[in-house]
Each structure stands twice: as structure tokens, then as C-alpha cells.
Amino acid sequence: MSVLLTGGAGFIGSHTAVAMIEAGYDVIIADDLSNSSLKVIDRIEAITGTRPAFYRIDVADRAALEPVFQSNRIEGVIHFAGFKSVPESTRIPLKYYRNNLDTALTVLEVMEDYDCSAFVFSSSATVYGETNEAPFVETMPTGSATNPYGTTKLMIEQIVMDACKANEKLSAVLLRYFNPIGAHPSGLIGEAPNGIPNNLMPYITQVAVGQRDHLSVYGDDYPTPDGTGVRDYIHVVDLAEGHVKAMDYALRHTGAEPINLGTGQGSSVLDVVTAFEEASGIPIKREIVARRPGDIAVCYADASKAKRLLNWEAKYDLRDMCAHSWNWQKNNPKGYDD
Ligand code: UFG
């Protein structure tokens, strides 16, 4: 059965491609490579022994996307394609609204035209906003996101829910990711941010490999056990497995289901630094600085709905996540660049 992964060459998309191929799906990747590399396709093949079909296209371009549906009998779509930098979205909001909404709308429209009715969306815990309190449960009202990137996730969730109400054949799972880190245990695929990383783990691994001098810890005066921000870090391979289960579910049901993908465990910034130091044997120089605007104190999932509906739960712990992130970074100090 063929499934299209838009943005399938990215960090989460590539790990999901591996998991989907291993689960027996025929994987088709559509990616414009604006924040990824063609080498990812070779690496997916090296891991799985199967080369996914690959189309270098912008999925917001209907004329480029339609032939993909014409040449393949696509039964489901996992939609990752979109811009994801929180600070950039605050600087250039229109770019984020234009791109993230356009890609989602075009994919949904083309799916309808080609009678493809299972949709899995790459959403985010950011939809819970600032006013809900962790653990975040899917029944909570979604908040107002603290940045335009987060708002695009909220808007697309709404669009998908409305589309499912209007089209009874359509089935969607809105996967609300917590904080994906780690890498494939092979060390062949992993996170390769452009420029200075915004997120904690790639920043730590770049300090470890000597590309950055020290980690800035954004605030130690939060109401948390050690004062630093608490997040629900989840291994990207567990997350990928959650997509396989979500697609299996979407193919058998109708309607729209928001589902958290997290471990249900919170870890502070300093917990992550310590776990990384233990896993890698490398001390991480750090400096406490002011809070980062828009950050909340505590964010972790109630992960019970994923267990109940998808029979999915995370298997890897924080130490594995750190060991695999380090394995990826030390084997690929420049990411996919030569
Ligand atoms: N942090 C630092 N120093 C850094 C980077 C991060 O101290 O250099 C801290 C943050 O303040 C936060 C924690 O590490 O407490 C995690 O920060 P990340 O930037 O890695 O992740 P966020 O929780 O801010 O954001 C992530 C995703 C977003 C998504 C959000 C949902 O990157 O896409 O989770 O809650 F919207």
C-alpha cells in the first residue's frame, strides 16, 4: 500500500520513512529539499534496503503534486512539509502563514480529488498554549500559540477538523509532538539544522563536537525542581513508530483525532545536559542566561490516548536519546554536508 510523506526527507519524516518501509508500506517522499538533503534518500535505502520513490517538489504547487497522485495509487498521506523555526516565524510571519497553510490546503485538496482519505498531520504540543497546565490532555481546549509557527499548527488542525466534518470519508490523526530528539541507532540519519540551532539537543551536540563554545541555559528561575524549563523529550524513532500506528488507524476509521506523542515524563534542561554528559563522556560547558521569550515552564504529555487508541507507547529513555543524538553528531559533524 502506497503512502505519501510530504517533507519526508526532514528529521522526523526520514525516521518515519524508515519505520513505514519496515512496516511494509510503499513509501513515496515529496520534498523540496529546502531544509534537507538528497543524501537522506540514500541513507533511508542503506538502512532499510528499499529506496523510497522520491519527488523533488514543493507540495504547495498543485501542478507538481497532481502527477504524483496520477502515477501512484496513494492511500494515505503523512504531512510533514512546513517551516518550523519558532524565531523565524516571529520575524517573518507571512512566510510561515503562506507556506504552512498553502502546503496543507493543497495536499488536502489534491487528496480529495484523487479519492485519498487517510491523513496524518505533524502537529505540535504548542497548540496547548500558555494557559493549560501539564500534563496536557487532548480534551483540553487548545490555547493561543505564542508564535506564528504555532498558530499555523492550530489553524491547520482546525482546517483538518472542518474538512473531516464536511467529508465523511476523510480520516485524520493530528499528532501533537512533544520534544523529538535522538536519531536512528545506525547513526545514518538524524537532525541537521541549518545555521545556529534553536533547539536544545542539536545545540548540545554541537557544543560536544566543538562547533559551539557553550550552551546558554534559558533561565533557572522557573517554578520547576531545578529552576530550568521542563519538557517531554521523545526519541524520534518512537515518534516514527507512532506515525505507523497513526496511519494504520486513519486507514480504518473516519473523523479527526488529535493524539499526543510524548513519553509522559518531564525532564529539565539540566537533566538533559547531565544525561548527555553521561551518555557521551563529554562535559558540556553551560551558562545560565535570561529566559527565552515565549517559553513556558513545564510541558509534558498525558500519553494515555496514544496507548488506548493506537496501542503505542515510547520505549526509549533519555539516556538512549542522548546516546543516539551523539552517535549521529559525531559521525556526521556537518550533518549531511560534506
Ligand atoms: N533551551 C535552552 N538553551 C537552548 C535551547 C533551548 O536552555 O539553547 C531550553 C528551552 O528554554 C526549553 C528547552 O531547552 O526549556 C527546550 O527547548 P527547545 O527549543 O528544544 O524546544 P521547545 O520546547 O521550545 O520547542 C519545541 C519545538 C517547537 C514546538 C514546541 C512545542 O521546537 O517546534 O516544542 O511545545 F512548538
Image: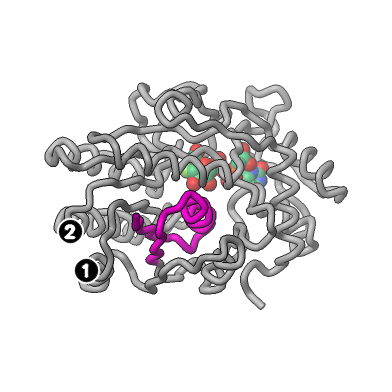
Residue 247 spot, x, y in % from top left: 37, 44
Identify which residue, 67 or 198, lies in the foreground.
67
Residue on which disc 2 sits: 114
Q: Is 82 above or below relative to 288? A: below
Mark 2 lies within 8 Å of ligand 1 (Cβ measured)? no
Residue 289 in sight:
no
Q: Specify the segment rendered in magenta.
A: 1-30
In the rendered image, the residue lying farthest to the bottom is: 338
Q: Is 198 above or below relative to 136? A: below
Quarter residue 84 falls in = bottom left
Residue 11 spot, x, y in % from top left: 54, 57
Q: Is residue 160 magenta?
A: no
In the rendered structure, the answer to whether residue 26 lies left or right of residue 216 reads left
Q: Secondary structure at mark 1?
A: helix
* Quadrant the N terminus occupies: bottom left
In the rendered image, the residue lying farthest to the left is: 166
Return the disc, 1 or 2, that comes first in the chain's sequence.
1
Identify which residue, 50 or 231, lies in the foreground.
50
Residue 38 in sight:
yes
Mark 1 and mark 2 in contact? Answer it, CB < 8 Å: yes
* Mark 2 Cα shell of 10 Å, populated few (<14), some (14-19), many (≥20): some
In the rendered structure, the answer to whether residue 243 lies left or right of residue 118 reads right
Residue on which disc 1 sits: 70
The amino acid marked with disc number 2 is: Tyr
Q: CA distance from mark 1 to mark 2?
A: 8 Å
Identify which residue, 69 or 49, lies in the foreground.
49
Q: Quadrant of ligand 1?
A: top right
* Mark 1 Cα shell of 10 Å, populated few (<14), some (14-19), many (≥20): few
